[in-house]
Image (cartoon, coloured by chain):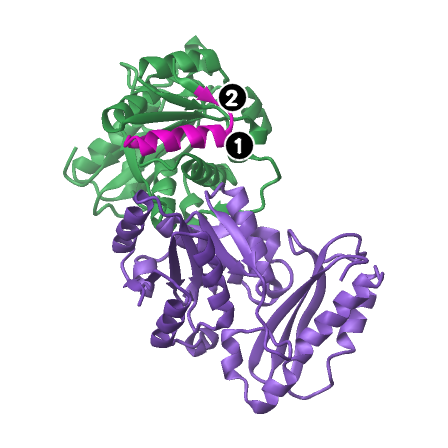
Chain colours: A purple, B green
Amino acid sequence: MPRVFASIEELRRHVAGRRRSGASIGLVPTMGALHAGHARLMERAREGCGEVVASIFVNPLQFDRSDDLERYPRTLDADLAVCERAGVDTVFAPSVHEMYPVPMVCAVDVQRLADHLCGAFRPGHFRGVATVVLKLLQIVQPDVAYFGEKDAQQLAVVRRMVTDLNVPVRIVGVDTVREPDGLALSSRNQRLNAQERELAPCLYRALQAAAAAIAGGITDAAEVRRRALAELPEHPLLRLEYLDVVDREEMQPVTSITGPVTVAAALWVGGTRLIDNISSRPGQL
Amino acid sequence: MPRVFASIEELRRHVAGRRRSGASIGLVPTMGALHAGHARLMERAREGCGEVVASIFVNPLQFDRSDDLERYPRTLDADLAVCERAGVDTVFAPSVHEMYPVPMVCAVDVQRLADHLCGAFRPGHFRGVATVVLKLLQIVQPDVAYFGEKDAQQLAVVRRMVTDLNVPVRIVGVDTVREPDGLALSSRNQRLNAQERELAPCLYRALQAAAAAIAGGITDAAEVRRRALAELPEHPLLRLEYLDVVDREEMQPVTSITGPVTVAAALWVGGTRLIDNISSRPGQL
């Protein structure tokens, strides 16, 4: 089993020892409720680093709704088993008090990176994400940190924060892991009932239609969007929050597609909000 | 002479080598135009650390007025001589382009820490200070960083940022160095003409009167302020920007003085803006 630390000081001491022994340090930040997508991140870290640290922390700062925070699944024992199978050496599982002993004053402002997509619907979310990721990077001081491509806007925020603030870490994005029917793995999938689970793959089908349209030469983002939406069935359990074509660095909407883009969407399936995205570029699948 | 680096990558390589040799790293961030106050910071770093790095960078992000940025003194050759005399090993003197190769998106939001004192008169100043200090801390990764107590609000911002974001560094505040007549050393003192220089010490006299009032048992901040203002002569070259009694951690104004406080002020002397502060607590000079 991985070693588990709840204390920042003890974790730092352990990681410093490993660093002195010449191990490169890899960090996989998670909120727990681990699935095969997280395991893929951990496996990538295992391949690349001498010491793999996974953090498990449900960060209150990035939840815009308290019911979502309360309902977020917490499954530490199962999570530790996933970590073990994926070859994680060390788990950092701090309490909220350990991470926020006094009310925060300073935070990372991510400005226009949060203007669109999820940022437009979850006020303060990416500020909370950037702030906790920066804290984790300062606590663990990894050489490499691994993030899933599924959370495209989060990855863009983290990459830009690390660049802008000169944080000495390499950020690696890891491909989304999907169910056979295309549904992206997510801790929130646990909440879907059978009927919702059957509907959910339409999200990825819509994104695939968008990517195919772009690869096929359609440059008008509005037309791409129309073709994607045509894949979403009219159903009382489905409600689209957004589906947009954005540039990859800053997640700003584009109207005419001339280079690499990300098509990102959020879809409510019953009471569960799912997100997904796909990358595409003109003339190339 | 100290070694001088303009490149982040080369500086990091040098510091990493020194760290591997077992040297503790001390950082003294400056904007150049070095005087005996900076030298005191460097001497403190010299006593405490195996490798002393001084940064010299006039940070555009923290200037709210472009004329102030343009007029800020730049004296690299003289600065290097000060560094050498104070025992600095390494100077980091990057260009603006090296520090800001692309326009910044992410920044450190310092929120209420910038609501009062200088923060109220210099919009964005402490956001710019916090952001560049965080960048320097990420670039150099010092064990200890040294800041002058003269810039009390800056020191409070840096301390809180480091705490909130878990930056692995110890922040040391160093006493203000003064001229025999009490004027706090500042790079801006160079701009004073003879008449202005003669007037300038009234700022510290006012702060001393405030500290004496507090030590003497006056707990009403408004009364303390009145006694301080009585020390400032009516003169066409003098214009007080603020003089306030604040708590030491968050620089928030207090009305009734029950514990340690800082009395901080900014005074325009002709076209030059001087700041200073003094710490006091009830019943104790």
Q: Which mark is residue A175?
A: none
Disc 2 residue crowd, few under 14, some 14–19, many 20+, Cα 10 Å: some
Q: Which mark is residue B72?
A: 2
Residue at the top extreme, as displayed: B194
Whether residue A266 is in magenta: the answer is no
Residue B272 showing in the rendered view:
yes
Q: Is residue A129 above or below residue B32?
A: below
Image location of residue B129, percent across then percent down = 46, 37
Mark 1 sits on what residue? B63
Quadrant of the image containing the N terminus of chain B: top left
| Residue B187 position within the rendered picture, expressed as x and y whole percent measured from the top left | 42, 20
Labelled pair 1, 2 in contact (Cβ < 8 Å)? yes
Nearer to the camera, B83 or A21: A21
Task: Please tell me which residue is depicted at 43% across the width and 67% down the height of the picture.
Answer: A31
Q: Nearer the viewer, residue B272 or A236?
A: A236
- Which badge, 1 or 2, is on the more N-terminal residue? 1
Disc 1 chain ID: B
Which kind of residue does numbered mark 2 sit on?
Answer: Tyr
- Decide if residue A249 is on the left or right side of residue B50: right
**Of residues B159 and A30, which is closer to you in this image?**
A30
Q: Chain of mark 2?
A: B
Q: Secondary structure at mark 2?
A: loop
- The span picked out in magenta is B4-25
Q: Amino acid at mark 1?
A: Phe
Q: Position of residue B121 (x, y in %)?
A: 49, 37
